[in-house]
């Protein structure tokens, strides 16, 4: 039986990208879900004009993690076998969706999650990541490898493929941008088979806001450590992420 693949995009105020991204995506895949997370810039109206997609709308905005949780629940309830998630800001290229989805059921190395990495290898034309975001990603990635026994190179890439049957074991409660950290702790604790997939490093809009005080890199890093430690405590795991975790100094 052919595997059913769903591609899901969490979207918030992406009127400048949504039409182009979805037009290209629909040339590669047939089943697409957009989670419109309370957009107010005309994105919702633009989505209503696009044929061949399903849309779930959050009112009001609930956060990036909440939008991904909705995508997980939709994939489970609608009987899909594989879920691919990607952002709608032009960072992720739809031409890779089929390839990353197929790796879940690779004959020789099946996986529960294939995680995109912008640092696994270099592509011609790769952009430089904003310095604070690359530094924090590096620190947190090193922390996850050290404390959870992972071997990853990019903790925050939103381009991922999941085995849908594995998603039912997750308990995602973090609704914002820190949700991937909760996901990594749970995936490691559940013994998921995890591999990475190299993707180009594309930044079209470098000044993304993380919300209020989290735009301060030091505050954001401290918050990420807090989220990780709260999840470790919820799981009854003894290790802790300290302020110097992942530091090379």
Image: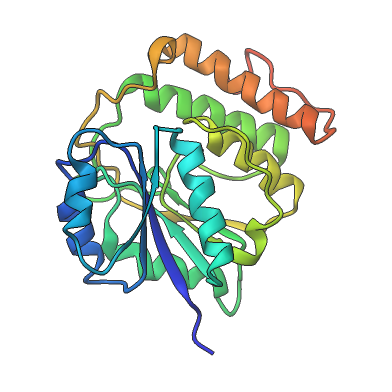
Is residue 50 at least partly visible in the picture? yes
Q: Is residue 248 visible?
A: no
Q: Nearer the viewer, residue 152 or 156?
A: 156
Tell me what residue is drawn at x 63 percent, y 12 percent: 243
In-front residue for pair 157/147: 157
* Residue 80 x %, y %: 52, 71
Above or below, comparing residue 3 to residue 132 in the picture: below
Quadrant holding the N terminus: bottom right
Residue 219 in the image: state x and y as whole percent.
49, 10
Residue nearest the viewer, comparing 84 with 192: 84
Q: Is residue 93 above or below residue 111?
A: above
Between residue 197 and residue 157, name the one nearer to us. Answer: 157
Residue sitting at x 56%, y 74%: 105
Quarter holding the C terminus? top right
Q: How is the image coloured?
A: rainbow
Residue at screen point 31% across, 38% down:
12
Whole-percent x, y for residue 130 in the image = 30, 25
What is the residue that sits farthest to the front in this orientation? 59
Q: Using residue 170 as the reference point, say whether residue 5 is left or right of it.
A: left
Q: How many marks?
A: 0
Residue drawn 55% across and 35% down? 179
Quarter location, residue 236: top right
């Amino acid at each position: 039986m052919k595997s059913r693949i769903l591609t899901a995009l969490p979207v918030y105020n992406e009127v400048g990208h949504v039409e182009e991204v979805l037009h290209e995506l629909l040339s590669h895949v047939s089943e697409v879900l957009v989670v419109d997370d309370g957009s107010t810039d005309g994105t919702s109206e633009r989505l209503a004009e696009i044929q061949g997609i399903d849309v779930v709308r959050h009112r009001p905005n609930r956060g990036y993690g909440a939008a991904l949780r909705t995508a997980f629940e939709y994939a489970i309830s609608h009987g899909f076998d594989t879920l691919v998630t990607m952002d709608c800001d032009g960072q992720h290229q739809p031409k890779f969706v089929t390839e990353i989805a197929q790796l879940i059921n690779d004959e020789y190395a099946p996986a529960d999650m294939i995680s995109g990495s912008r640092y696994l290898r270099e592509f011609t034309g790769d952009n430089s990541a904003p310095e604070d975001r690359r530094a924090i990603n590096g620190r947190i990635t090193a922390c996850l490898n050290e404390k959870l026994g992972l071997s990853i190179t990019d903790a925050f890439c939103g381009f991922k493929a999941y085995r849908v049957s594995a998603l039912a074991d997750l308990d995602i409660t973090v609704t914002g941008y820190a949700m991937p950290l909760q996901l990594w702790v749970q995936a490691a604790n559940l013994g998921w088979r995890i591999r990475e997939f190299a993707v180009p490093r594309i930044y079209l809009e470098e000044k993304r806001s993380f919300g209020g005080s989290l735009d301060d890199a030091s505050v954001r890093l401290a918050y990420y450590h807090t989220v990780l430690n709260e999840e470790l405590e919820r799981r009854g795991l003894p290790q802790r992420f300290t302020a110097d975790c992942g530091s090379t100094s």
